[in-house]
Amino acid sequence: MSSHPVHGLPFLPGNSYRDPTKSIFHRSQTLTYRNGYSRPVLPTVGICREPITVNQLSQAELDELANKRPTLTYGQVRQAPPSSFIPVYVAFDKKVLRFEGYFKEAVPISQEEVYRVRRVSVYYYLEDDTIAVVEPPVENSGIPQGTFMKRQRHPKNDSGDHYHWKDLNVGVNITLYGRTLRLVSCDKFTQDFLESEGIELNPPDEIPPDPYTELRREPDRTFTTPPDFDKLKQFLTMDRKVLRFFSLWDDSGSMFGETRPVIIHYYLMDDTVEVREVHERNDGRDPFPVLMKRQHLPKSVKDLKDTFPKCVLEISDKEVTEWYSPRDFMVGHHVTINGRKFFLYDCDAYTRDFYQQSLGIEDMTPVDVKKSRDKEAKQEIPPYNGYGLLEDSLQNCLTLVPKPPKKDVIKMLENDHKVLRFAAALDSMNPEDIGRRFILSYYLSDDTISIFEPQVRNSGIIGGKFLEKSRIPKPGSSMNDPIYYGPADFTIGAVVEVFSHRFIIRDADLYVLNYMKAHEHQFPCKVLSSLEKHLQPQEGDGEPGRTDAQETTDGRTGGSDPSI
């Protein structure tokens, strides 16, 4: 056993301990680099040894180790996905290959055709390898066309394999649910896609003609018609060919007549004429579309006897010497139909072309018939007849359905429950009216006046409401434009005439004086001064004198109507 060289203890388990004076715990460096070579370092003096040249890796091996991915020690190594991976349904989203083709359908029950050639468009969707077949519609084919096969994955063989875009090419046949489709061409995108994938396209093919379609395109057999006019030929060649003229019917010569726009139709199939009305919005007329039904129009008639029953028999070819023809309808001229004159001012494009090609008439210039807009007539309000209020009667002249007159809502809200009360006496030559006292209330919210007569015992006069709330016009004002009494017209000693009754203002409420002082800019100075002189405190008294209006209303000032 050897002992510790410093402390003298044996170097045995349990006898050794850590040096408490040690302060450096890092792992000592054993290698260093100088001039690109690794050298060991002596732990005592730090002197570098000679560079290690044994088992050194070359630069190619170092690069290989740098690019090599780490592998697991246990288990199968999984290949990392590429950094720029894009799913197929994202890469081929909305990318469709389009092929044009056809298939032949057997027709066993027809004597005119054995098979029928039907054109189709085949769409291959790259995102999910589905195929849709669409048949373009053909006019008057009698076959329900459109989506021939819905979008789905189609089986290629009995093994369960499905068609892939690598199986499609120009000039090949594909069988979908028992129908063999021949692909004859494709679009530009399909061609570029297949060539980019290394598939060489076959030369484009042609769709064979349909025998029945070619048979229908053959010219009709011609016949030599007799020299007389053939009505059947006219019916067959001129069917659904109509000349349309825009005209004006001037009916201003009759009572309550006017100029009305109409449309005249001339049917080339049988030389009949029809007149249709043109309705405008709010024209006030019944919505009858036809003014004159379709019929033959005679231009000149033989001189018929008075015994000819026109009311029950129609005029036939025997009585008519000439019928109306297209040459009688010219733009810019008048035409008489059943005694009514119509001015033709324009026609449609087909009518203009028909006259130029068939009749050689090129002068079909439209005529401007628009009238200058008349000035709106000013509304004249009739004079007031005295029934009802002036504002209510005025609403009957402004609208068809009268509405209540508008009120000043702001004024009503600001002056709600504000009433000016005055004591008045009746100025009358009748001796029974002497001594009658009235309370005249002026409502600031709507400028109305009500009069109340207090009851007096043993007077023989029934008191109460003398006048309901109403606006009182001043005497001498116009009936159509009246001037109503306002709060500035009620002064002490003023005379107020109410429907032939004269009232003299004798007294006022203290609320009237306070209101006029608060709104002195709305009242003349003489009105305010008359109230101040009348309601000023008497000499020697501490408070103003009690007025008649206060005594009658028991001290109530402003707020409610004494008649309520």
Image (spheres, rainbow, N blue to C red):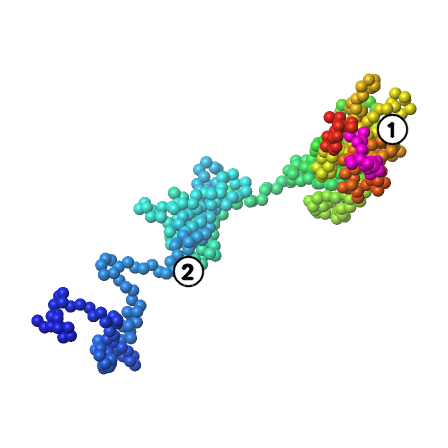
Seen in the picture, residue 481 relative to 15 is either above or below; the reply is above
State the quadrant of the C terminus.
top right
Seen in the picture, residue 155 relative to 6 is either above or below; the reply is above
Q: At x 86% / y 26%, what residue is drawn? A: 426
Circle 2 — which element? helix
Horizontal and vertical percent for residue 75?
Answer: 23, 57
Q: Which mark is residue 111?
A: none
Query: Of label 1 and label 2, which has the lower sequence position?
Result: 2
Looking at the image, the residue that sits furthest to the front is 540
Whether residue 501 is visible to the viewer of this picture, yes or no, is no
Seen in the picture, residue 531 relative to 368 is either above or below; the reply is above
Whether residue 37 is visible to the viewer of this picture, yes or no, is yes
Q: At x 91% / y 24%, what residue is drawn? A: 429
Name the dominant secondary structure of the magenta segment.
loop
Q: At x 30% / y 59%, what residue is drawn? A: 79
**Which residue is tagged 2?**
196
Horizontal and vertical percent for residue 224?
Answer: 64, 40
Q: Is residue 532 magenta?
A: yes
**Which residue is tagged 1?**
502
Please state the extent of the stretch shown in magenta in the rendering: 531-550
Q: Amino acid at mark 2?
A: Ser
Horizontal and vertical percent for residue 535?
Answer: 81, 36
Q: At x 26% / y 59%, what residue is drawn? A: 77
Q: Residues within 10 Å of mark 2 (few under 14, many from 20)?
A: few
252 and 415: which one is in front? 415
Please tell me whether mark 1 or mark 2 is closer to you in this view: 1
Q: In the drawing, does residue 155 fall left or right of residue 357?
A: left
Q: Amino acid at mark 1?
A: Arg
549 and 18: which one is in front? 549
Q: Is residue 457 magenta?
A: no
Separation of disc 1 and disc 2 at Cα? 112 Å
